[in-house]
Image (cartoon, helix red, strand yellow):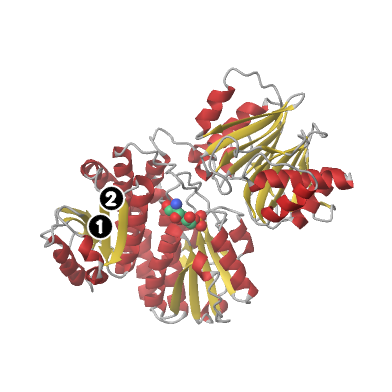
Amino acid sequence: MCGIVGYNGKEKAVNILLDGLSRLEYRGYDSAGLAIRDKKIEVFKAKGKLDNLREKIKGKRLKGTIGIGHTRWATHGEPSENNAHPHISNDGCVTLVHNGIIENYREMVLKLESHGYKFYSETDTEVLANVIDYYYKKYKNGPMDAINRTMVRVRGSYAICVMFEDYPDELWVARKDSPMIIGISDDGLYAASDVPAILKYTRNVYYIDNMEVACLTKNKVTFYNLNGDEIKKELKEIKWNLSVAEKNGYEHFMIKEINEEDEVIKKTFNSFVHNNKIEFPISDDELKNIKQIYIVACGSAYHVGVCAGYIIEDLTKVSVRVDIASEFRYRHLELDKDGLVIIVSQSGETADSLAALREAKSQGVKTLGIVNVVSSTIAREADYVLYTLAGPEISVATTKAFSTQLIVSYLFGIHLALLKGKITNKEYTSLIKEVSTLGDKTKKILDKLTNDIQKLSSEFANVKDAFYIGRGLDYAISLEGSLKLKEVSYIHSEAYAAGELKHGTISLIEDGTLVIGIVTQDDIYEKTISNLMEVKSRGAYIITISPENIDIPFSDYKIHIPNTSKYFYPSLAVIPLQLLSYYISVSRGLDVDKPRNLAKSVTVE
Ligand code: M6R
């Protein structure tokens, strides 16, 4: 949901800002803009992708060494040049970029209008610039005071990077519930929504917390709390190397990230399993006392939750309730005090998931985050965090983070099952051993199936609808297959519990309708096969994904995956589904990594 970059240093800001924005485009790409200060602040904006902005400033000699940039995912106001950031206050005193939503912006508009302010855009961000301007002029106590007063006055979420006309050598940053990091190098200081934007220049970063303000000069950053008192922060080192955030010869990040899955699965497994024992940062006693588990997440992370729900419940016999975060947060559930709320999130910033976490904490229930982005808000606020080691995921459609979240879920289920006395030591060891093979099995699938699925995909590039069906865990993974297809190919698709089709949806099946059957679960596969037969009889074209030992003779196209334990098939079945979605999107000539209307990290409700 919008990407921000700021720079104040010795180098020309324009190149650093454009490079940083290009690495944040996954956060939003319906318009982009930057403000650079040489003698005065100059603002450039363009509708559409970053290349349009590049085109616009081509040939301009922008020498300024301080500036801010933004790539937008529209919330208030259509994607247009006028609504693009940076936004400027009425007399140009304040120029800012913003990621988030100001919820009470209408109220602020009325207040400001009564003081003579006028607005040129439909955005809440322009209002924010003017609120800062208003307090700046009213109290005449400088930038920090104006920003602090604004933070107290506005509601919502924001990360902002601000330039004041009167302070040519300073860049101001503040945040609440939207991510922001500050990087530091010999060449200058950087502000960014995410690490990849500045990794080329520095690995040394500060994490700015909620309701904190920072002032970046050319060689120093100073942090303040809401009272204006200076606060000290610890400098952290980012361990990634830049290549993880580059395409490395692949045409798209999505296919690069699919091809990284075997490695990140192993890495994540190895970070929790030592000498065949699972080690988590939660005490055994605490886990043993858990009476109820809630798994809460959005999108693909929710689908991991659905898989985890089946697995953990079956292994541990503890009841698991899986909820979509945007529903959970307004359901006003009275949570079991002996429960554990697990939030699954790649970004660790998803607004609804974060709100669900806070709701659980407010009820005094323990929380556990399964998170990919280190030091993200969910990771910091959860009582415990289990990091997935997927590395930076740039493609908007998640693939490798999904796979690592599954691994953590399996390990959690196995660990808890042993603590609860529901599996023997022998079963524990054998399940762990099986999880340890999933990286290699994933690699095998990638090597064996990529070319075939590429060919198959070109045949389905023009289908109108697709249905994904399965039972139990196969249904859970159908949900993910279907979401993956629709988000990157814009083909309408639905996932259905195979047994539920004939209660309505089967009326949509006609000659040639594409139905993808996931058939991996020993105890129920025959029932899914019957359901597939039902759609086949009505003319469907059937693709099946199953292990070698499950044969579906009437399937029109069979995809076989290696054998594993019944619990772990989601990891193997999802790979061909991801490949299928990717190659269908490529065949349709779409922008795979940045599908329309989407953003990687959804920091608004
Ligand atoms: O960062 P999160 O894991 O919390 O994000 C949740 C969803 O927004 C995300 O999984 C989304 O559904 C992906 N684009 C799917 O590929």
- The three-letter amino acid code for the residue at tag 1 is Pro
Residue corresponding to mark 1: 562
Q: Is residue 101 above or below residue 366?
A: above
Q: Is residue 438 above or below residue 248?
A: below
Residue count near mark 2 (Cα–Cα under 10 Å), binned few <14, some 14–19, many ≥20: some
Q: Earlier in the sequence, mark 1 or mark 2?
A: 2
Instruction: Name the one closer to the observer, 437 or 454.
Output: 454
Residue count near mark 1 (Cα–Cα under 10 Å), binned few <14, some 14–19, many ≥20: some
- The three-letter amino acid code for the residue at tag 2 is Ile
Q: Position of residue 568 (x, y in %)?
A: 34, 64
Which SS class for mark 2? Answer: helix
Q: Which mark is residue 445?
A: 2
Q: Which mark is residue 439?
A: none
Q: Is disc 1 in contact with disc 2, using a CB cutoff of under 8 Å?
A: yes
Q: Which residue, as the protein is rendered here, is positioned at the far right?
A: 140
Q: Is residue 495 above or below residue 34?
A: below
Q: Position of residue 517 (x, y in %)?
A: 23, 60
